[in-house]
Image: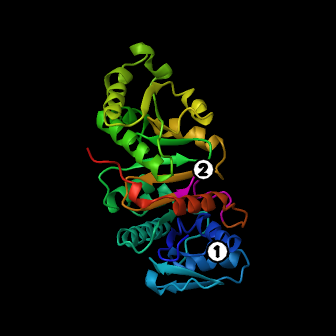
Amino acid sequence: MTASAPLAVTMGDPAGIGPEIIIKMYLRRPDKRHWLVVGDPMVMERAASMLGTELRIRPVSSVDDAPFEAGFLDVLCASRLCDLPAVATVSAAGGRAAFDAIAAAIEIARQGRVHGIVTAPIHKEALAAAGLTYPGHTEILAELGGARSVAMMLANEDIRTVLVTIHCSLAEAIRRADFAAQMDAIRLAHTGALSLGIAHPRIAVAGLNPHAGEGGLFGDEEVRIIRPAIEAARAEGIDVTGPWPGDTVFMQARTGRFDIVVAQYHDQGLIPVKYLGLDRGVNITLGLPFVRTSPDHGTAFDIAGRGIADPSSLETAFDYAVRLKSGNMRANKR
């Protein structure tokens, strides 16, 4: 990592495992400490105390004030909670503090003060309790990050997938998976693969229906929408094929036939990645003017506060953020 632009790591929901795995990542990787936390200092102090570490939490008011000294974890103050939310408990205060950390991190990322953002997990019910109607990180990033369109890419060392639709019901996903959404996802998959160093990305698009519709026997979305989008993207010079049956395309990608798969809806794309292990997967938001990654798991309230959470997925997300080039994150405008 260069010494010029640090990464920002948001604390996540204060009642979840986010603060704990952040502390553990700092302790486990002394050679990779050019980063700061965006969040609440008291939350991070509680996590450090719970783990029994002598690590000191140092509040800072700006990125420039962070000296990145050994033994100190710098925390850019996004909130100052008077009373800490109980561990493993949904609360409006926790949802608001988590959101404030994300918003502050987005602001410094848009200003170019940090290379990118790594986000610890948030709890959607806590956001709702705070009166925040965002389904998740991606929608917050899209609204506050100044992006025309965004897409979620899930990646590990075996397979990568970009989603056409994200957090919505399956019925709504079918309605949203129109021609424009297909084109956005294909273009972002292409630029996302480039940002990972893949010089000539080979993209496969999964079908929406069983057997990719069987020529219209099981649904006509492939014929009416998906195939025309693939042909239009190929006319732009993108190496994309399909639609391929969703039950086999990820197996083909894993064996090396494709570099990235465009999936039509949330579970179609996430199940194959998560099946290979939560500690190996990373969530990358494409289309933003800055890098954003996150671990491929949630707040884990069932183990929060017990000191047993594994920081491996956060470390993987951190390493991807270092690897990604923000200039390649946007889709080409056509």
Q: Which residues are magenta?
A: 294-304
Q: Secondary structure at mark 2?
A: loop
Q: Amino acid at mark 2?
A: Gly
Q: CA distance from mark 2 to mark 1?
A: 24 Å
Say left or right for 173 vs 321.
left
Q: Which residue is mark 2?
A: 281
Q: Which residue is mark 1?
A: 47
The answer to whether residue 37 is seen in the rendering is: yes
Q: Position of residue 37 (x, y in %)?
A: 53, 74
For image coordinates 51% across by 52% down, the residue present is 196
Q: Position of residue 29 (x, y in %)?
A: 68, 71
Q: Secondary structure at mark 1?
A: helix
Seen in the picture, residue 240 relative to 69 is either above or below; the reply is above
For image coordinates 57% across by 82% down, the residue present is 68
Seen in the picture, residue 266 relative to 64 is either above or below; the reply is above
Residue 289 among those drawn in magenta: no
Seen in the picture, residue 56 relative to 33 is either above or below; the reply is below
Q: Nearer the viewer, residue 95 or 108?
A: 108
Seen in the picture, residue 149 relative to 216 is either above or below; the reply is below
Specify the quadrant that holds the N terminus.
Answer: bottom right
Say left or right for 289 vs 303.
left
For image coordinates 69% across by 74% down, the residue present is 27
In this figure, what is the number of numbered marks? Answer: 2
Q: Amino acid at mark 1?
A: Ala
Say left or right for 122 vs 330.
right
Please, what is the dominant secondary structure of the magenta stretch? loop
| Circle 2 or circle 1, nearest the eye | 2
Classify 10 Å Cα crowding around label 1: few (below 14), some (14-19), many (20 and above): many
Residue 123 - label = none
